[in-house]
Amino acid sequence: MKISELKSSFRSSLQGLYPSEEVQSFLDMLAEKYLSLSRIQITLKADGKVSEEASERFEKAILRLKKQEPIQYIIGETEFYGLLFKVNQHTLIPRPETEELVEWVVSEQASTTQNAGHVTILDIGTGSGCIAISLAKNLPNSQVHAVDISSEAIKMARQNAVENRVEVDFFQTDILKTKSLPTGEVQAEKHYDIIVSNPPYVRELEKKQMQPNVLDYEPETALFVHDNDPLLFYRVISRLAKTSLKPGGTLFFEINEHFGNEVAELLKEEGFTKIKVKQDIYGKDRMVKG
Ligand code: GLN
C-alpha cells in the first residue's frame, strides 16, 4: 500500500466520528510513531510504500479510535512539559493545565534564594510521574519523591523517570489511610520544601459533561471524588503537609475550577499563609498555593 492510500483509507474510516483536524492530528501522531515520518514527510512521500506490518498497526489503531480510545493510550506515550511520558490505562493522560502547575512551581522556585537552590519535593498522586519528573528535570538541585495509590501507575512512573534520565523515589501509599508522608531513607518530619498534588477533583455530577474517551478509558481513581465531599483530598493532604513541610515550605495544588475559594479557605483554616489562587490560560481557577 502507498502512503497516499493509507492516508485516504485512514481518513474515510474515521470520517464523521471525529472532526477532520483531529483525524489529521491522529494520522500525524501515528505516522511519526509507526512510520517514523514527520507530518511534512508523509505529504512529500505520498508514493512511498507502507510495509505490511505498519499497515496492520494502522488498522488496529483505527479499530481502537472507533471505540473512542484516547490516541495517547494507543501510541502509549504523550508529551508533557517538553518531555516524553509513557502512559497506559493505569495513569491519567497528563493535561496542559498540569503543565501550568509545573511552570508555577518552577518559576516560584527560581525566584527564591533559599538553600542555594537545593530543594526537597514530594508529589502526591503522581500517576505517570509527569509532575515529579518534570520538576526533577527542571530543578537540577532537587531531591524528588512521589507517591501514588496504584502500584501499576508507580511502575509506569519509574519507567518514565529512567527514560527521562532523572532520579525520583516512588512510594506506593494510600494517602487517605496513611498517618504520615514518606520521606525516603531519612525518617524526618518537616522534610519537604515543596509538596505538590493534582488529586482527583472531578465530581460525579460532572460526569455527564465528560466525553467517552475519558469516561471509558481513564482511571476513575485518578479523576473522581464523591459529590458530598469534593475537597476530601485537599483536606487530607493539607493536614499531612503541615507536619511534612519545612517552615516556610510551600504546598501547591491543582484544583477543580469551581473550588478556588473553598480550597483557599480550607488552607487558611489549616494554618497556611500567603495563599494564592491562580487561573489557567482559560481564565479558570486552576491552582492554589500556600
Ligand atoms: N483536569 C482533569 C480533567 O479534566 C482532571 C484531573 C483531576 O481530577 N485531577 O479530566
Image (tube, rainbow, N blue to C red):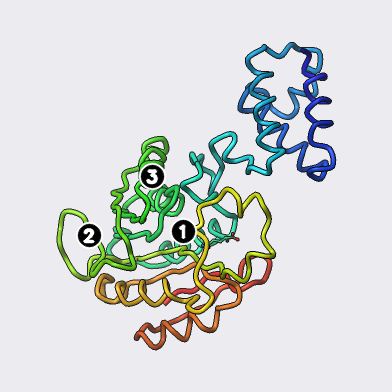
Question: Which one is earlier in the sequence, the residue at label 1 or at label 3?
Answer: 3
Nearest the viewer among 115 and 62 is 62
Task: Say left or right for 34 vs 237.
Answer: right
Which amino acid, mark 1? Answer: Thr
**Circle 1/circle 2 CB separation < 8 Å:** no
Residue 161 x, y percent position in the rendering: 38, 41
Tag 1, which secondary structure?
A: helix
Instruction: For marks 1 and 3, give the CA distance.
Output: 12 Å
**Circle 1/circle 3 CB separation < 8 Å:** no
The residue to which callout 3 is attached is 152
The residue to which callout 2 is attached is 183
Density class for disc 3 (Cα within 10 Å; few <14, some 14-19, many ≥20) is some
Vertical order, 74 against 99 (above or below): above
Residue 87 x, y percent position in the rendering: 50, 42
Task: Say left or right for 50 vs 215.
Answer: right
Residue 234 x, y percent position in the rendering: 42, 74
Task: Say left or right for 262 vs 47.
Answer: left
Question: Which one is earlier in the sequence, the residue at label 2 or at label 3?
Answer: 3
Vertical order, 158 against 240 (above or below): above
The residue to which callout 1 is attached is 221
Density class for disc 2 (Cα within 10 Å; few <14, some 14-19, many ≥20) is many
